Amino acid sequence: MKKLLYLSIIIAGFQSVSAQNFTRKDSLHGGLRPERTCFDVQRYDLNIKINPEERTIVGYNEIAFKVVENSSKIQLDLFDNMTIDSIIHNSKKLDYKREFNAVFIDFPNGLIANSSEKIRFYYSGKPKVAKNAPWDGGFVFKKDKENRHWIGVAVQGTGSSLWYPVKDTQTDEPDLGSKISVAVPNGLMNVSNGRFLGSEDLKNGYTRWDWEVKNPINNYDITVNIADYAHIHDNHNGLDLDYYVLKYNEEKARKHFEEVKPMMDCFQAKFGKYPFADDGYKLVETPYLGMEHQSAVAYGNKYLKGYMGSDLSGTGVGLLFDYITIHESGHEWFGNSITSADIADMWIHEGFTQYTEIVFIECQFGYEKAMKYARGLNRNVANDKPIIGPCCVNQEGSGDMYPKGALLLNTLRHVINNDELWWKIILKYSETYRHKIIDTETVVNFFNKESKMNLTPIFDQYLRYKKIPGLEIKVVKNKLEYQWKTDVADFNMPVDIKIDGKEIRLEPTNKAKKSKFKVKSIDDVEVLKSEFFVNVFKV
């Protein structure tokens, strides 16, 4: 699914990478070259067998694609520890060359633009095992407390080619959906994305479980979850809700997941209809903390409130909800429906999704608690490096993309200072780019247009530099003087303060301004830091 001009990405990538120390392997994974841009994936049909005891995968991915430009070669991807058994096109084996994790496949008769093609990529091997999923990519092979196999996979950032052959870039999604068929030992179940089609006993000690996704899906969202699951089905306002949990947790899960219904009400009111209704919504209990696998959200928070029982904000508000349920489900709108073209722009996923936590709190518990939570998130911002990473080398920016991205959005809400307009903008953003692949420039241009304000300097300061805006204030002859200290030139952002309990809006720039307000002491001035994520320097 191509929704961007590849040329602009490639140029930006060359400019970004040229001054940094990245390898050929990095650019093969993250970059766009003719062997990738010459074709558009239409569908994946993944058919594999997983042996839990040997920790192996064997099978194939049948890849249907449309040729965009004449070519004799395409690039797919599969980690080099996995074996390529054969690649078949029109009943004939194709030659290929491997370079790191990239697989360059030759078509001796060439590929003609606008033609539709299909290959079957057979492979096998032992996929990488994660050391600390989901923060590092790989499979998780564990046992539940009944000593039954419990398996999951999380590969965001590391790459979906870690475990199946794929066009491993976020710029292309299978337009016509995907089918995921996974054979596992009898007595176990596999749960993947989309709708359950059925299962078949293969008469060899394995049962194949078939799932189908109707919507485009980004590569790292395609998943397998293997366990002895209990299935809980529910429905809320016409939306199917399905929960797959370890059998001994069924009663606990039925009660705990009631939180999903008010969450859906809130998110659909603020962000629009659930983006994958025809694929349903699932929570699947996993042996790792969580991941936003589209329509099969990985849940491993052990039925606790907060983040593994703690509060990321340090305010107590974070213990009012299950962080993993709310955050990972928020990704259905931001990350799964709206996807960043390059991992460098992952703040488009994580910043907006951490903001959904603030939105949910406001829906459920009110504005004051939401702002308390927002201010509490300040403590998680390191300001160590820019949120936006280098393009085209599969490199994220700072982990600040989560809290700092969310606090940027909370700040923009209060800069705009019109809640009716703000919620219209957020809803329109979600609906305009529903099932689309975008970049930061697209986000900034949209918010500028809809707000009728020039928000570019604000986005730039928060996203492209380490530091957040610093508001310098001082009292000179009982008058307040103020100015912004920023990396961005000509920075202009309003900010609200209180003097003697009275709320006042300032319009600081990089040049010092003097207010008409009398102030006895600098300590009488309070900057509303719950609404504006800024540093304050009182001099």
Image (tube, rainbow, N blue to C red):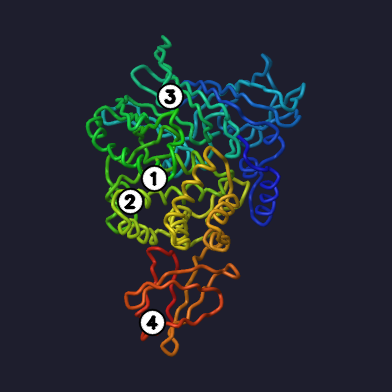
- The amino acid on which the numbered mark 1 sits, given as a three-letter code, is His
51 vs 367: above or below: above
Residue located beneath label 1 in the image: 327
* Of the image marks 1 and 4, the number of the one nearer the N terminus: 1
Residue 192 percent location from the top left of the image: 43, 27
- Residues at marks 2 and 1, CA–CA distance in whole angstroms: 12 Å
* Of the image marks 3 and 4, the number of the one nearer the N terminus: 3
Q: Residue at x 55, y 33 (%)?
A: 161
Circle 2 or circle 3, nearest the eye: 2
- Residues at marks 1 and 4, CA–CA distance in whole angstroms: 39 Å
Residue located beneath label 4 in the image: 522
Residue located beneath label 3 in the image: 195
In this rendered view, identify the residue nearer to me: 319 or 185: 319
- Residues at marks 2 and 3, CA–CA distance in whole angstroms: 30 Å
* Of the image marks 2 and 3, the number of the one nearer the N terminus: 3
- Residues at marks 2 and 4, CA–CA distance in whole angstroms: 33 Å
Q: Residue furthest bottom?
A: 477
336 vs 210: above or below: below
In this rendered view, identify the residue nearer to me: 157 or 113: 113
Mark 2 closeness class: few <14, some 14–19, many ≥20 residues within 10 Å: many
Circle 2 or circle 1, nearest the eye: 2
In this rendered view, identify the residue nearer to me: 438 or 188: 438
Mark 3 closeness class: few <14, some 14–19, many ≥20 residues within 10 Å: many
Q: Residue at x 40, y 26 (%)?
A: 191
Labelled pair 2, 4 in contact (Cβ < 8 Å): no
* Of the image marks 3 and 1, the number of the one nearer the N terminus: 3
Residue 186 percent location from the top left of the image: 36, 16
Residue 501 percent location from the top left of the image: 32, 75
Residue located beneath label 2 in the image: 361
- The amino acid on which the numbered mark 4 sits, given as a three-letter code, is Ile
